[in-house]
Image: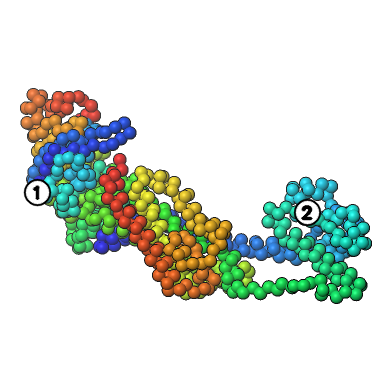
Amino acid sequence: MIEARDLHKAFKVKTGLVRAVDGASFVAGDGGITGLLGPNGAGKTTTLRMLYTLMQPDRGAVSVDGRDAAAEPAAVRRSLGVLPDARGVYKRLTARENIAYFGRLHGLEPQLIAARTERLVAALGMEDFIDRQAEGFSQGQRTKTAIARALVHDPQNVILDEPTNGLDVMTTRGLREFLLSLKTQGRCVILSSHIMQEVGLLCDHIVIIARGKVVAQGSADQLRLLSGQESLEDAFVRLIGSDEGLAT
Amino acid sequence: MRTVWTVMRKELLDLYRDRRTLILTLFMAPLLFPLLILGMGALAESRARTQLESTLELPVIGAAHAPNLVAYLGTLDIRAIDAPADPQAAIRDQVHEVILEIPADYPAQWRASRPAVVEILYDSSRQDSRIPVARVENALRNYSRRVATLRLLSRGVDPALGEAVVPGRRDLSTPEARRGMALAFLPYLLILSAFLGSAYLVIDITAGERERQSLEPLLATPSSRAAIMSGKIAAACAFGMFSLLLILLSFKLSFQFAGSGPFRGVDVSFGAMGRLLGILAPMVLIGTTLLTLISASVKSVKEAQSYMSVLMLLPIIPTVILLVTPVKSQLWMFAVPFLAQNQAILMVLRAEAVGPLQWLVYLGAGFGLGLVLWLIAARLYHREKLAISA
């Protein structure tokens, strides 16, 4: 379970202070998929970075499975699987070596890494390219490698930044099934997206973020009810107050 | 500790897969340095030999005033030729290296047994003219002494009276040390190789990894940042030491092949090579940690690389200072980075013993500085901005 309480984060830039995240609170429970939905530049990535302890919130707190992220960052990171916005797969290593590297950094034994890798390869459909060097991988192959790498230590909580970004329809469908299987395993999954249908199809709980603030949250039905709109898209436009950065 | 080992192994594997870069960085220097050194040595030697032993064509102005002198020069393989119309321009335009001028009053002075003035025209800023000028000057001095001796004898005076004190010279430098002088630039090459030999690797695994955006997932693992950084530093140090080993081996082989020449007798035993490796080890650590520190504090690989030109000059500074104000080798020097390496390498090459106290100060100061730089770099690795590339 991941809990964000009143997160604030501002960056200094030449023109002044940018409030990237300006009061974000939500709870993502186990056995469910929580979606952060918002236009480009709404503060989704910054929020996620605070969740996986890469950034310290200026104000507010994050707790993962009841542990405070600021007090025990290493323990929190151990219980998190993270797919960052930048996939950062090492080009000169094979997909298998990429996964094994992170397994070792998590302190896993080689046999355990090998067994987990086999499971993830089967679940994600990586058989064709698992022993190829990542140089020249397609976007989908890179994403799959990065997801397998993030899950090699079997984390209870999974954070994915725009997981379906740049993937074709078939790969997206496969990934969707994989994420639903994580949910049925009782894990807590958080993903961010600017794609409405994606979030509508996958997520049990939707957190709509605009200009660093949480403007509404609830299930898809609750959001439609809240905004008085028939479709989720209209609800979204209504709730963020504009149609900027919207993709369907 | 396990993280350090894991990261180090991954970085070395990553580098090993990048064959072309690996081969260029590992083998370029060991192939080029000996060529440079031996080529330069051979060139200087052959030039000196031709200038010393070949016939020197000396334009003489007013040769007719001193036929005896011209004949004497001829016996020393200095052949007088006609002087150019404008001697000053000839020197300035580098047509001739040296010109002798015999003034019109030379015969009159000669007959009166007075000192007759002759002038040597040359350009002291030209390296080329040094040997010919010295040859002409020596020949003139010898001629003058001979004639003076004859004049004294003809007047019944003992020529020895003309010399009250005869200064003699005894050169006490060891043969190795004399040759060591020819090696003044060798420490610079070695220090530079140790200091920046793995520079591109270091920049790549911190600033480059950040630019490729793979640092964010890496730092999101529970491994401590200090351990990740240490693994990267360890990989770069291992690579740096290996490439130094290749360079030293290539020096050893090429000096042995060179045999005679200006580098004969330079200590290239395995013991000396081992000591050199020991001397350069702290330099490898200092270079790697300093570059890690820089790479962790800049925004891009390009920015990190722009520090390189300044860093390349650092090892020259002590050499230049020693050149301008030569000072005796003292203990404190072994604590000053670059200067210490310079001193210690020269001592080893000149086959002088480095004392235990000097080793202690040297290694203490070198690794101490490396540790301080490591601590600062580790602090920078904890900055929030480091992981965020976009």
Q: Position of residue B239 (x, y in %)?
A: 39, 61
Asked whether the residues under marks 1 and 2 belong to the same chain, the reply is: no
Q: Nearer the viewer, residue B347 or B204?
A: B347
Dot 1: chain letter: A
State the mark number for residue A101. Answer: none
Q: Nearer the viewer, residue A141 or B75?
A: B75
Q: Contact (CB < 8 A) between labels 1 and 2?
A: no
The answer to which image quadrant residue B137 occupies is bottom right
In screen coordinates, is B108 left or right of B264?
right
Q: Nearer the viewer, residue B101 or A25?
A: B101
Q: How many marks?
A: 2
State the residue position of label 2: B121
User: In this rendering, is residue B112 above or below B125?
Assistant: below
For badge 1, the amino acid type reads Gly
Q: Residue at x 77, y 65 (%)?
A: B138
What distance separates the C-alpha of mark 1 from that of mark 2?
A: 92 Å
SS for callout 1: loop
Q: Position of residue A150 (x, y in %)?
A: 21, 50
Dot 2: chain letter: B
State the mark number for residue A66. Answer: 1
Quadrant containing the C terminus of chain B in the rendered view: top left
In screen coordinates, is B66 left or right of B212?
right
Q: Residue at x 84, y 58 (%)?
A: B117
* Classed neighbour count for the residue bearing mark 2: other residues with Cα under 10 Å, few (<14), some (14–19), many (≥20): some
The answer to which image quadrant residue A119 occupies is bottom left
Quadrant containing the N terminus of chain B in the rendered view: bottom left
For badge 2, the amino acid type reads Leu
Q: Position of residue B153 (x, y in %)?
A: 89, 73
Q: Residue at x 58, y 72 (%)?
A: B176
In screen coordinates, is B122 left or right of B179?
right
> Which of the two discs, 1 and 2, sits closer to the camera?
2
SS for callout 2: strand
